[in-house]
Image (cartoon, rainbow, N blue to C red):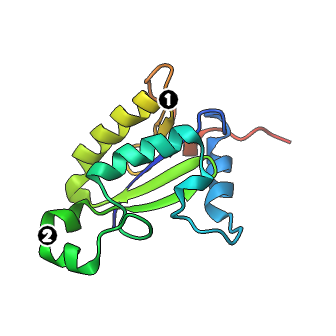
């Protein structure tokens, strides 16, 4: 099990529509690589470039080799599984790094103007303009009636 957190383009969805948007994004399979940062927004690219300086990708471009991971236990625990979409970056951290990873993730998100969904930590959505969590976790939002 991992500590999951998501950065996304704040213009991609509203808090009210986040649950449906996330479901659609997580089910999307358009045949592209999910470790290619060039497909996402410039703000998310800059965010990810800084994040991977501390938490390198486990797979794909810029990831450490198996020998490097075997030789450095700290590096092994910092290596992170990323999934990159057109308007999001999802990260799965080791639980032993959850507090430090969340703190850096939120700091970098504010710096780069991206929103955050605390998927494994109460499901709050934090927008760059206010840095205040959404009033309700996204999964509890009422869906409009037809």
Furthest toward the right, the residue is: 146
As helix, strand or loop, the secondary structure at mark 1 comes to loop
The percent coordinates of residue 116 (x first, y second) are: 47, 39
Binning the other alpha carbons within 10 Å of mark 1 as few (below 14), some (14 to 19) or many (20 upward) gives: some
Seen from the viewer's position, the closer of residues 141 and 51 is: 51
**Please, is residue 89 above or below residue 122 in the view?**
below
The quadrant where residue 77 appears: bottom left
Residue on which disc 2 sits = 72
What residue appears at the point 65 percent right and 56 percent down from the top-left corner? Answer: 25
User: How much space separates mark 2 and mark 1, taking CA atoms?
Assistant: 33 Å
- What secondary structure is marked by label 2? loop
- For the C terminus, give its image quadrant: top right
- 89 vs 12: above or below: below
Query: Which residue position holds label 1?
Result: 113
Locate residue 144 relative to residue 47 in the image: left or right.
Answer: right
* Pick the front one: 122 or 108: 108
The label on residue 80 is none
Q: Is residue 118 visible?
A: no
Please tell me which residue lies in front, 25 or 137.
25
Residue 27 vs residue 125: left or right? right
**Position of the N terminus by quadrant:** bottom left
Q: Quick one: label 2 or label 1, which is nearer the N terminus?
A: 2
**Residue under the image location 43 percent in, 66 percent down:** 61
User: Residue at coordinates 50% horizontally, 51% vertically from top-left?
Assistant: 89
Find out whether the residues at labels 2 and 1 contact each other: C-beta distance under 8 Å.
no
Q: Is residue 51 left or right of residue 87?
A: left
Residue in view at x 58 percent, y 54 percent: 38
Where is residue 70? Give x, y as percent.
Answer: 17, 78
From this viewpoint, is residue 127 visible? yes
Label 2 environment density (alpha carbons within 10 Å; few <14, some 14–19, many ≥20): few
Q: Return the residue found at the far top.
A: 130
């Amino acid at each position: 099990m991992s500590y999951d957190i998501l950065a996304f383009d704040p213009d991609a969805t509203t808090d009210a529509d986040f649950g449906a948007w996330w479901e659609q994004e997580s089910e999307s399979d358009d045949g592209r690589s999910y470790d290619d940062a060039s497909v996402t927004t410039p703000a998310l690219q800059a965010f990810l470039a800084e994040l991977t300086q501390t938490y390198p990708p486990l797979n794909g471009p810029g990831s450490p080799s198996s020998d490097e991971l075997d030789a450095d236990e700290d590096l092994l625990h910092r290596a992170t599984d990323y999934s990159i979409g057109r308007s999001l970056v999802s990260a799965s951290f080791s639980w032993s790094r959850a507090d430090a990873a969340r703190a850096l993730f939120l700091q970098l998100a504010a710096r780069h103007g991206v929103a955050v969904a605390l998927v494994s930590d109460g499901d709050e959505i934090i927008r760059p303009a206010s840095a205040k969590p959404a009033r309700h976790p996204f999964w509890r939002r009422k869906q409009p009636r037809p």
